[in-house]
Image (spheres, rainbow, N blue to C red):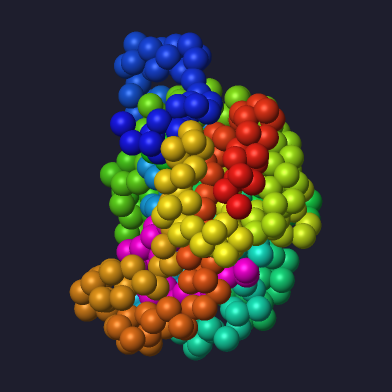
Amino acid sequence: MSFKQEAKRKFPKWPIYDDEEIKALISLIKSGNWWCGSPGIHQGKNVWAFQEEFAEFQEAKRCIAVFNGTVAIESALLALGIGLGDEVIVSDFTFVASASAVVATNAVPIFCDIDAESLVMNVNEIEKLITKRTKAIIPVHLGGNPVEMDRLMEIAKKYDLKVVEDCSHAHGSRYKGKRIGNWGDAGTFSFQASKVLTSGEGGAIICNSDDLADKIYSVSDCGRSKNQYFYKHFIYGTNYRMSEYQAAILRTQLKKFPAQHALRNENAKYFMDKLNEIDGIRVIKPTPGTTELGWYVYPIVYEPEKFRGISKAEFNKILNRFSVPTDDPYPPLHGLDCFKNIDLRKGIDYSNANWGGEKSNDKYFPVVCEIYSRCIEFPHEMLLASKKQLNNVVEFIKSLK
């Protein structure tokens, strides 16, 4: 077992489950209804129930449950008409799926640098990236921290662009009174194993338009339409349906989520205040107007010169040896091999992208590269620990100076 794995054992385990999840799965298996069916003829009950429950929690009108967060983004983009040669602006500091889902629609992701304090898409950079081919923006709420969605939506309206919010980290986040995911045309979520709301795998799209929700459903279920004959396929679609097993787990996890969400937010604020007192440490700054964060990851940026010149790799090792778990931040997308070497969809013209070959040089993405070189992340389960444990982490980091 690595030091990193051992360190995680000192803090609350993840996922957290009890007999309720076990009973839900046993009940599902015994029912014999192992898939959801269709809107007109329900087989299982869990997918349909979860869609209603998650929409209510996220304060959205509609929810479409799918198999994972990647296809959630893809389904939303396809339903919005994004396709061949269209350009979609995406944060450069995110998991590859935020961009690979764009590639899957035969569109071209365009990478946007980040704000040095909030670590999310810098809305001041968006207009510089807009061309006659730009059709959409994917703001990524890294760590649950909202992009400045009011300003972003003004830009989107000005240029008639669609907006799909990547909320994979932002379950329960709230910005200026509105749940994240409700600002754009659609909001997409992931329920992958490490997420704050999880079923191992899983995804969902929320929106407030019945027409768009029905199009997303059709894309994700073989081109079918609600309450129509099962073997009629009205548009191109594929099978991205969520399974009953995923939904059964999610329904029980969703009941536990509000209490966990409240504790994460309480401890995140406490931890932030303590860490920010250390010269050379800065926690991700919540975007002004944010009242709740999903806190999927807890990023800090450190100054090596204030810590005896310790490299990021060594900083991680030292923390792990002291039983402090850390996670690796996402490498900036522009430097990933698939984009740098343009090893993507065949037959698509990527020549106008702002990446690939020399265009993937770090000098063109100065903020994200500088931040990435000094960024360390703590996993969200740390925020479910006691304040005594968090204090111990703070004191140990102080001792490294």
Residue 110 appears in which quarter of the rendering? bottom left
On the rendered structure, is 356 left or right of 207?
A: left
| Residue at screen point 42% across, 14% down | 22
Name the one closer to the observer, 337 or 129. 337
| Residue at screen point 64% across, 46% down | 398
Would you say residue 102 sits in the magenta stretch? yes
* One can see residue 178 in this view: no
Q: Is residue 84 above or below residue 382?
A: below
| Residue at screen point 36% across, 63% down | 100
List x then y, in percent, for residue 351: 32, 87
On the rendered structure, is 204 left or right of 104?
A: right
Q: Is residue 1 above or below residue 58?
A: above
List x then y, in percent, for residue 147: 64, 62
List x then y, in percent, for residue 255: 60, 25
Name the one closer to the observer, 6 or 25. 6
Q: Is residue 321 above or below residue 103?
A: above
Q: Is residue 195 above or below residue 328?
A: above
| Residue at screen point 30% across, 83% down | 357
On the rendered structure, is 379 left or right of 199?
A: right
| Quadrant into which the N terminus falls | top left
Would you say residue 28 sits in the magenta stretch? no
The number of numbered discs placed on residues in the rendered structure image is 0
List x then y, in percent, for residue 367: 55, 74
Q: What's drawn in magenta, residue-wise?
A: 94-116
* One can see residue 249 in this view: yes
